[in-house]
Image: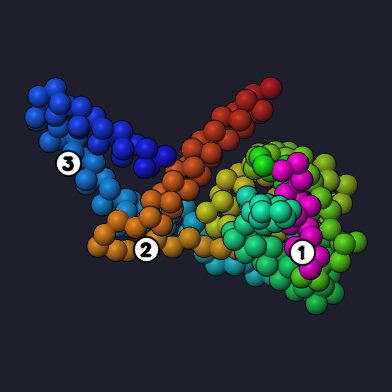
């Protein structure tokens, strides 16, 4: 998203130079250079990420109800050559946080069910929910306490398809696990389907401040813009849903 936009500005500057439009070339070239440093050195991603993630920086107090549901929002998967899909690096942080919550819940003497939500990956006909559930089982979460929602392909569908499962569970408290960057959009989607959840963040994204542009900052800016655009789209979904 960011890199193609910067390349487009650079190409426009080159074209302007070829056509003899020197002032336009200088203006576009300067704009691209300033944007590259503003994004790559940290100011822009810091502006986008700090307030966005701030509500989820601290994990909540673990005030367990007698009956709890922990909902794990899957991320992307890795597809190693000759192997089956497995959680990505970000995905494993969510798996670890979910397993930790489950153990704390059981240690408190409460009832706890883990709902893993996520459909098929683009490159394999195997649900993300299954790959993540297998990772949870390896960390000691009993299969009897694991439920799968293997059909959703978006965060909105995570909430939509989880709603009837959670209604059947009738858990007194729902905990929603995802990355801090993703939780704002996830919480919004779950609220639209009447699910009052407590957000628990796994990983937390930090900007790299540097004198030269960093690829990580470019990637983080892309990720942040994806979340902003996604939330705007979900507001439209919610307007359409409640309109009818």
Q: Which mark is residue 235?
A: none
At 59% from the left edge and 61% from the top edge, which residue is drawn?
Answer: 89
At x 52%, y 58%, the residue is 55
Q: Position of residue 16 (x, y in %)?
A: 17, 27
Between residues 17 and 232, which one lies in front from this camera angle?
17
Q: CA distance from mark 3 to mark 1?
A: 50 Å
Residue 172 % position (x, y): 81, 57
Nearest to N terminus: mark 3 or mark 2: 3
Residue at the disc numbered 3: 30
Residue on which the image places disc 1: 136
Q: Quadrant of residue 115?
A: bottom right
Q: Main secondary structure of the magenta part?
A: helix
Q: Can residue 141 be seen by looking at this rendering?
A: yes
Count of numbered badges drawn on the protein:
3
Q: Position of residue 181 (x, y in %)?
A: 52, 54
Horizontal side of 236 relative to 164 (left or right) equals left
Per the rendered image, the range of residues in magenta is 124-138
* 75 or 175: nearer the viewer: 75
The residue at the far right in this view is: 144
N-terminal of the pair, mark 3 or mark 1, is 3
Q: Residue at x 66, y 28 (%)?
A: 242
Residue beneath the point at 31% across and 38% down: 7
Please check the rendered image and state whether residue 137 is part of the magenta-colored stretch, yes or no: yes
- Indicate whether 135 appears above or below 231: below
Picture layout, residue 190 above or below residue 61: above
Q: CA distance from mark 1 to mark 2?
A: 31 Å
Disc number at residue 208? 2
* Helix, strand or loop at mark 3: helix
Quarter of the image with the C terminus in it: top right
Q: State if disc 2 and disc 1 touch (CB < 8 Å).
A: no
How many residues crowd mark 1 within 10 Å: few (<14), some (14–19), many (20+)?
Answer: many
Looking at the image, which residue sits at the far bottom? 107
């Amino acid at each position: 998203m960011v890199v193609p936009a910067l390349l487009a500005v650079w190409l426009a500057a080159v074209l302007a130079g070829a056509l003899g439009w020197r002032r336009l070339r200088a203006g576009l070239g300067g704009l691209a250079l300033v944007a590259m440093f503003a994004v790559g050195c940290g100011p822009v991603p810091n502006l986008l990420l700090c307030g966005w993630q701030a509500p989820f920086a601290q994990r909540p107090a673990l005030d367990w109800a007698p009956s709890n549901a922990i909902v794990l929002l899957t991320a992307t998967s890795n597809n190693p050559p000759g192997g089956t899909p497995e959680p990505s690096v970000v995905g494993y942080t969510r798996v670890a946080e979910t397993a930790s919550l489950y153990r704390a819940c059981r240690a408190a003497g409460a009832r706890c069910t883990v709902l893993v939500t996520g459909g098929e990956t683009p490159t394999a006909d195997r649900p993300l929910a299954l790959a993540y559930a297998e990772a949870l089982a390896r960390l000691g979460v009993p299969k009897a306490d694991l439920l799968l929602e293997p059909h959703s392909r978006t965060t909105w569908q995570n909430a939509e398809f989880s709603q009837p499962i959670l209604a059947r569970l009738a858990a007194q408290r729902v905990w929603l696990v995802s990355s801090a960057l993703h939780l704002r959009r996830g919480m919004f989607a779950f609220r639209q389907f009447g699910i009052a959840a407590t957000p628990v963040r796994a990983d937390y994204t930090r900007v790299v401040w540097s004198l030269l542009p960093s690829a990580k900052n470019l990637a983080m800016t892309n990720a942040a813009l994806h979340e902003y655009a996604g939330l705007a789209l979900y507001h439209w979904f919610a307007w359409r849903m409640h309109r009818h």
